[in-house]
Image (tube, rainbow, N blue to C red):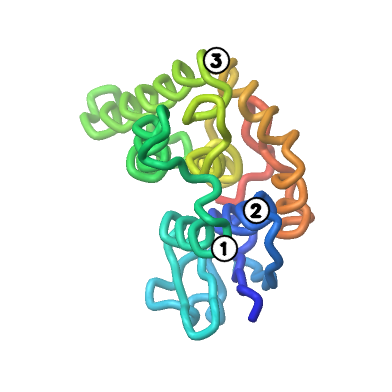
Amino acid sequence: MVLVIHHLQCSQSERIPWVREELGIDYELKLYQRAPLFAPPEYKALHPMGAAPVIQDGNLTLAESCAVIEYICHKYGNGSLFLDPTHAAYADFLYWWHWADGSFQPAALRIKSGRVEKSNEDDVMARFANERFKKAIGALEKRLGDNKWLAGTEFTAADVMVVFTLTTLRYFIPYSLKEYGNVLKYLQRIGAREAYQKAMSKSDPTMEPVLGPESPKDPKM
């Protein structure tokens, strides 16, 4: 039975077809459009959380990006895109794999579509959110100054996890990357990957990938 990927278009579930393309594994892709902003009822019905991504593998229904990616890579990819504990860069991989959703994406979500930068400087929470995001993107910029990929020389699942926050999320939360040259070079390397190109053309054929310094001119929110 072929694994089924339920993809909510223009969402973080884009990571899952990308992983499958990197692994060269067959899959069935079911597309769902936002209605108009959030997931439609039929997508929410797939899993109790009602959020993307969701996959079905036989009788199994699984959600959460990290869980889905780890499941696919180990069950179908013999551990591809993950580093073994004996690998010299294992700790680096582990850190950035968890950092992507544990630190970076929450920091980006807190900037609230750019409104934080325009908020009163006396607003403690606004300043905290803005500083937190700048610290996170600054850490990424520094890491990519000396490394081709987050774990070093090897492309891994950590890279798959971080890209959504740098790209498609900017349709909802606009922010500029013009000050982060290393990040922009990294996104060009991502955009040149055949698996990424295939996955995006299949999952979001009408959406322009956000690989440049500025956010899209037609934000979703």
Q: Residue furthest bottom?
A: 59
Q: On the rendered structure, is 197 left or right of 167?
A: right
Residue placed at 38% from the left, 30% from the top?
92
In primary-sequence order, the first of circles 2 and 1 is: 2
Viewer-proximal residue among 112 and 167: 167
Find disc 2 in the rendering and name its residue: 23
First in residue order: circle 2 vs circle 3: 2
Q: Is disc 1 placed on a helix, strand or loop?
A: loop
Is 216 on the left-hand or right-hand side of 42? Answer: right
Q: Are marks 1 and 3 in contact (CB under 8 Å)?
A: no
Q: Which of the two discs, 2 and 3, sits closer to the camera? A: 2
Query: Mark on residue 179?
Result: 3
Q: CA distance from mark 2 to mark 1?
A: 8 Å
Q: Secondary structure at mark 3?
A: loop
Q: Which residue is mark 1?
A: 76
Q: Which mark is residue 45?
A: none
Report the front residue among 213 and 3.
3
